[in-house]
Image: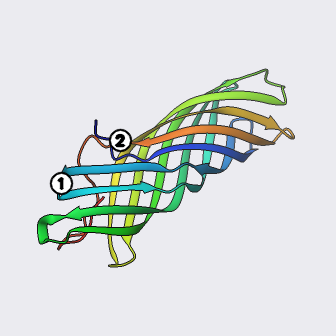
Amino acid sequence: MKKLLTVLVLTICMSGQVSFAQDIRLNIYAGYVFDDQFDSYYDIDNYYDGKIEGGLQWGAGLEYMLKPTYGLELSYYRQDTKAPTTYASDYYGSGIKFADFDIDVNYIMLGGQRHIGKPESKVDGFAGLMAGCAFANLSDPNSDASGSTTKFAWGLKGGANIWLSEHVAIKLQAQLLSATQSMGGSFYFGTGGAGA
């Protein structure tokens, strides 16, 4: 079965959280993203096979507490990384090539969270769902060619807030972010160039 061309991101985050008022929270995120493989095979002479390397993902979110146990968060995440890729394109007789593409992936997500725990507790758990957009930009440092794409994205997250004071907490979080791709490729450079 063909793998979907997606960015599957599992992040374990340790971040800060600041509560400005009883109803608004600012969340600062930093975490590690794991490697992900991708491939796209049109035929034996036209294919792309590579991986998006793991690394630092950072971001921020603004969470509005609808109730003490329900929050709505608008968040932004970014990862800058490399995508070592082997590809073949027989359109111009180029044969098999290798490129170490530069890629940045940006997510803008809106999601709801359910907070679990007593209102005055020093630790409260949470779980939530997110939906939004993924924006990916890819460039080939060898040819200075570039491309970009925008995809629907979804996510899951869960973890716990450990409150250090009334307004500051450390947030321990695991999350899954995924940009959906139904079929085909997204990046193309033209005139015998590359794609992913």
Residue at 80% in and 36% down: 162
Q: Position of residue 49 (x, y in %)?
A: 33, 55
Amino acid identity at mark 1 = Ile
Near-viewer residue (136 or 144): 144
The image's mark for residue 180 is 2
Q: Residue furthest right?
A: 165
Q: Is residue 13 left or right of residue 185?
A: right
The image's mark for residue 44 is 1
Near-viewer residue (180 or 42): 42
Q: Is residue 58 left or right of residue 166?
A: left
Q: Position of residue 177 (x, y in %)?
A: 49, 41
Q: Position of residue 48 (x, y in %)?
A: 29, 57
Residue at 69% in and 42% down: 25
Near-viewer residue (5 or 86): 86
In the image, residue 139 above or below residue 179: below
Measured in 3D between alpha carbons, the distance from the residue under mark 1 to the one under mark 2, in whole angstroms, is 25 Å
Q: Residue furthest bottom?
A: 143
Residue at 83% in and 26% down: 121
The image's mark for residue 53 is none
Amino acid identity at mark 2 = Thr
Which image quadrant for residue 132?
Answer: top left
**Label 2, residues with CA under 10 Å away: few <14, some 14-19, many ≥20:** some
Q: Position of residue 44 (x, y in %)?
A: 18, 54
**Label 1, residues with CA under 10 Å away: few <14, some 14-19, many ≥20:** few
Residue at 40% in and 76% down: 141
Q: Quick one: quadrant of the C terminus?
A: bottom left
